[in-house]
């Protein structure tokens, strides 16, 4: 994408800190996000990225530090307050949806217009269609969310965030649940948000995506801010070194499986409309790789 952000600062964070038993993360982190900027927050799992974003979205209260919107200090009380302040968040780990309701009802849940106490569905479908047209998925607004695939449900989350007229949109590793084609669509959405002068914060642990997604990148490690770089200076070795605190060397290990005792066997695993006839086994000392498209996560959900 390259650095194209030239707007004013819409969100500024100064020395934000959150204490948990035995750990502090984030630990005095600061950043500033400008209008029309895509800002990547990068770090390993456990670096404090998600907690930091939960603080910004009102799901978690900070212990120290200051948050400013348009230069004015704010205390974000809860997720509803964050939305009122113009901050929207999209989580990839969980869906903030009611599966038995339709696509239209989920996008404007809690913000429907009524006539004589009844939901105005004509208005609902019109407003929702406008948001879906911005991102392009061909989804029937009357379809129940539970009948959609993972990738479609993710795009519904994006449409919901857009409907909030947010100043800042936070995407927590959004591409993890999207196919390559849908990832390209998401990149187009980020670009359109920038053109509408929104700030976008993208949370990731994958340095190879940074140059495609952002203008600047801030790296967190063990809850602390390690540094901020423009994407032009953020090559992959540098980002990895900032993430883990050392240079990484890769070694190829040539070994044959010793065929230890079988620890797990799965035969003809199935799940309605998702899985059919899945069989595999895993032996002690062996690594079994499952490879596939978006629905592969349903294998682990079923086993769990």
Image (cartoon, grey):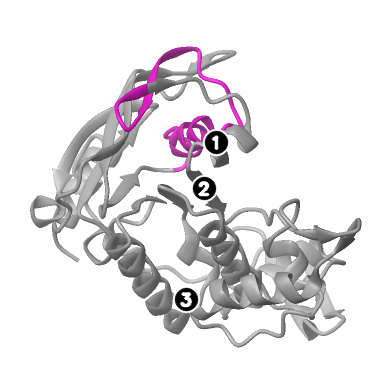
Query: Does the residue at mark 1 contact the one at mark 2 (Cβ under 8 Å)?
Result: yes
Decide: few, some or many residues near mark 3? Use Cα within 10 Å; few <14, some 14-19, many ≥20: some
Can residue 262 be spotted in the picture?
no
Instruction: Say if mark 3 contacts mark 1, CB within 8 Å.
Output: no
Residue identified by numbered label 1: 82
Q: Residue at x 63, y 70 (%)?
A: 127
Residue 66 falls within the magenta-colored stretch:
yes
Coordinates of residue 105 in the picture (x, y in percent): 77, 65
The magenta segment: 45-72
Secondary structure of the residue carrying tag 3 is helix
Left or right of 117, for residue 7:
left
Who's the residue at 55% across and 38% down the image? 84
Pointer 2: what residue?
88
Residue 208: quarter of image: bottom left
Along the viewing direction, whichever of 205 and 157 lies nearer the viewer? 157
Which image quarter holds the N terminus?
bottom left
For marks 2 and 3, the one nearer the N-term is 2
Q: Is residue 67 visible?
A: yes
Q: Which mark is residue 134?
A: 3
The residue lying furthest to the left in this view is 233
- How many neighbours does mark 1 have within 10 angstroms: few (below 14), some (14-19), or many (20 or more)? many
Q: Residue furthest front?
A: 116
Mark 2 vs mark 3, CA separation in Å: 17 Å
Q: Position of residue 18 (x, y in %)?
A: 49, 18
Counting from the top left corner in percent of width and height, residue 168 is at: 41, 47
- For the residues labelled 3 and 1, the Cα–Cα distance comes to 23 Å
Q: Quadrant of the C terminus?
A: bottom right
Q: CA distance from mark 1 to mark 2?
A: 7 Å
């Amino acid at each position: 994408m390259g650095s194209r952000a030239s707007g004013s600062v819409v969100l500024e964070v100064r020395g934000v800190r959150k204490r948990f038993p035995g750990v502090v993360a984030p630990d005095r982190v600061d950043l500033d996000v400008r209008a029309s900027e895509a800002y990547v927050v990068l770090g390993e799992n456990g670096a404090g990225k998600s907690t930091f974003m939960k603080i910004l979205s009102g799901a978690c209260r900070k212990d120290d530090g200051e948050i400013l919107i348009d230069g004015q200090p704010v205390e974000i009380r809860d997720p509803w307050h964050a939305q009122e302040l113009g901050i929207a968040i999209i989580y990839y780990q969980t869906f903030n949806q009611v599966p038995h309701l339709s696509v239209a009802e989920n996008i404007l849940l809690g913000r429907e217009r009524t006539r004589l106490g009844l939901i105005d569905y004509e208005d609902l479908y019109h407003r929702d269609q406008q948001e879906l047209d911005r991102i392009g998925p061909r989804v029937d607004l009357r379809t129940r969310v539970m009948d959609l695939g993972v990738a479609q449900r993710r795009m519904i989350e994006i449409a919901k965030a857009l409907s909030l007229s947010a100043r800042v949109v936070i995407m927590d590793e959004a591409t993890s649940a999207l196919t390559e084609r849908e990832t390209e669509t998401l990149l187009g959405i980020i670009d359109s948000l920038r053109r509408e002068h929104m700030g976008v914060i993208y949370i990731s642990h994958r340095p190879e995506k940074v140059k495609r997604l952002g203008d600047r990148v801030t790296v967190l490690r063990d809850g602390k801010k390690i540094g901020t770089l423009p994407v032009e200076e953020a090559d992959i070795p540098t980002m990895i070194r900032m993430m883990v605190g050392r240079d990484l060397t890769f070694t190829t290990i040539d070994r044959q499986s010793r065929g230890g005792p079988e620890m797990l066997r799965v035969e003809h695993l199935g799940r309605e409309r998702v899985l059919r006839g899945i069989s595999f086994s895993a032996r002690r000392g062996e690594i079994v790789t499952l490879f596939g498209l978006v629905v592969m996560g349903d294998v682990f959900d079923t086993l769990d």
